[in-house]
Structures are given as C-alpha cells and as structure tokens.
Amino acid sequence: MRPKPPFDFERSAQMHSRFRNSLPDLYEDNVYMRVLRTDRKPVLVSVSSRGTIREPRLLIDTYPLLNNSEVVQLKHVLRLMFEPTFDFDRFYAIAKKDATMRTIAKKLRGLRPIRPPTTFESVIIAITEQQISLHAAIAIRSRLIQRYGDTVTRGGRLFYSFPTPESLAKAKPAGLRKTGLSASKARCISEFSKKIANDEFNLDRLSQMDDDQVVAELTKFRGIGEWTAKYTLIRGMGRVNSLPADDLGIRRAVSQAYFNGRSISTEEVRITMTKKFAPYSGIAAFYLMYHLFWEQPSS
DNA sequence: AGCCAGGTTTAAT
DNA sequence: ATTAAACATGGC
C-alpha cells in the first residue's frame, strides 16, 4: 500500500504504544497490529513501513488467509485508516505562517492520526474517555474489548477486535459495569449500540453531512454531548476543521503555545485556532498536543 | 488519603 | 438559560 505522502508511519503508529496494553491497537518492534473485520470473520492485520516519509510504502500482512472479496473489503478499511482526508501540503502551507506552528510542523512532518476503522468505534471510545483520565479510560476500554471483542489466535497469542455494535447491544448492564464503566455510560453505550445494530440509525449517513449536522445528529443520543460529537468528528471521521475547544488537553496545548500557559476560555481556543489555521484547526490542535504531550519530557 | 482528570445528564434555580 | 451534583476509575 502506498499512502499519500508525506507520511511518517513510525511516529504516527507509536502513539499507540505509549500506554501498555492500550487495546485495540498494538505497536511492537515497528509493526502496527490490529484485528479488523470482514463480513464475518476477524482478521489480524500487521502493518510495517517499507518506505520513507517522502515515499511511504506499507507492507500489509494478514492472518488467516483471505479470499478475494475479503481482500477488497480490508483494502477499503485500510484506506480509511491510513489515507488522509485532506491536503497536507495546504495545511503545512498555512502552518508556516505561524512561527510556533512552523517549528512544530517541520519537526513532525508526516505525522497524522491513524483513524479507527469505524465511526462506531470512535463514538464508543469517545464515551469511555469522557471526564476520566486517559489512563483510566484506556484500562476500562481494554477490559471492554477483551470482554466483548472477537479474537484471533496467532503464535499462541490472543488478539482482540473492537466489539461490534451487535456484540455491545447484546451485552448485559452488569457485564458492562464490570469493565469499570459507570452506570450511565454503560446505559448510553448499550442504547447507542442497539440503535446501530438494528439499523435504527446508520452511521454511514454522517459522511454526507457537514460538521454541524453531524454534531446535531450525534448529540441526539443520550450520553453524547458536544465534546463527544466533535471528538468523533476529528478523530474518527477526519474532519480536520472541527475541534472540541472545551477539551482540557487542547486548552492546555493552545495556552502553552500562544498564551504563556495562562488559563484560557473555550472561546479563546476556538478563535485563536480558527483564525490561525482554518480550515485545519483540528489537525493543528492535534499537532500542538502531540508536541506538548508526546515530544516534551514533561510539563 | 484525597484530589483531579481530554463530560453528560438530571434536576433545581 | 445557567448552575450544581452525581458519576466510577486510576494515578500521583
């Protein structure tokens, strides 16, 4: 597979090895691993780089072996995950106009978020990450995946897929609670999964809508507020001009970069980022956060 | 030990 | 329309 350049696969993938056991993504020895689904069966996909940032080339290995139709399906999913949804050259051109971002973008050139394969997964991840710390969220999410995901065994090792809407729709409240979810989040996840599983709501429709419409549609669900909807837009759907301006991490990053670290309002975040980087304010915020939290020793 | 962390809902002004 | 409390867990 040859994704559009520039793409720094190593840097982009290693975000997923930041925390031990942060399922469903694994990154070990420069190989990104993940269980993806075809129609029915879960497939362990291993991705490693055989190219450069300027000429990215990804080697894809799958297990078990696939038939032709399954190969087609997986190719589609992999494109969703690794191909950018926008023109990086234009983003970098705009980034250059800002002194701080110029430095960061130059250093991080080719970095991009690897997107989860489905919007459903993005929504569930966002719900688990509401309010609680990232560490807590990852622990809970891993238990959710181990309890409700499908598995592939390879080399005596067990790999988990992200749970399907059907599997979470069938989950009992007590089972969901056991993963560490609060009662209200468990209920929200159950309700949401049921509506997706029995096709009461089709998440694919969202891709036809503009950002504001998507937020309006998603916030109709109980348990999905503005933060969760916008998080889904930027991380799950690659809508790079949306940004959860009320997000604590983004606020810290923007404050650090442009306000000397003083605490700022969500309005200041929105105005600053939009003014400087529209229509790429979301990806710009991602770069600021990566720079602040992943690259620097501490803060 | 206690407080806070990448929110949302419900209920009460 | 705005404000407050409850929520569950993990890390420091």
Image (cartoon, coloured by chain):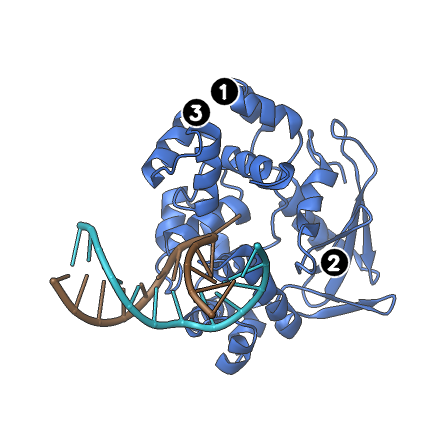
Chain colours: A blue, B brown, C cyan
Crowd tier of the residue under label 2, counting other residues whose Cα lies within 10 Å: few below 14, some 14–19, many 20 or above: some
Q: Which residue is mark 3?
A: A276
- Of pointers 2 and 3, the one earlier in the residue sequence: 2
Q: Quadrant of residue A43?
A: bottom right
Q: Is residue B12 left or right of residue A53?
A: left
Looking at the image, which residue sits at the far right?
A155
Answer yes or no: do the residues labelled 2 and 3 have beta carbons within 8 Å? Answer: no
The front one of A71 and A61 is A61
Q: CA distance from mark 2 to mark 3?
A: 43 Å
Q: CA distance from mark 1 to mark 3?
A: 7 Å
**Does A46 appear above or below A186?**
above
Q: Which residue is mark 2?
A: A70
Q: Secondary structure at mark 1?
A: loop
Q: Is residue A169 left or right of residue A115?
A: left
Q: Are marks 1 and 2 on the same chain?
A: yes
The front one of A295 and A211 is A295
Please state the horizontal and vertical placement of residue A159, each as a whole percent of the image.
Answer: 75, 65
Q: Which residue is mark 1?
A: A98
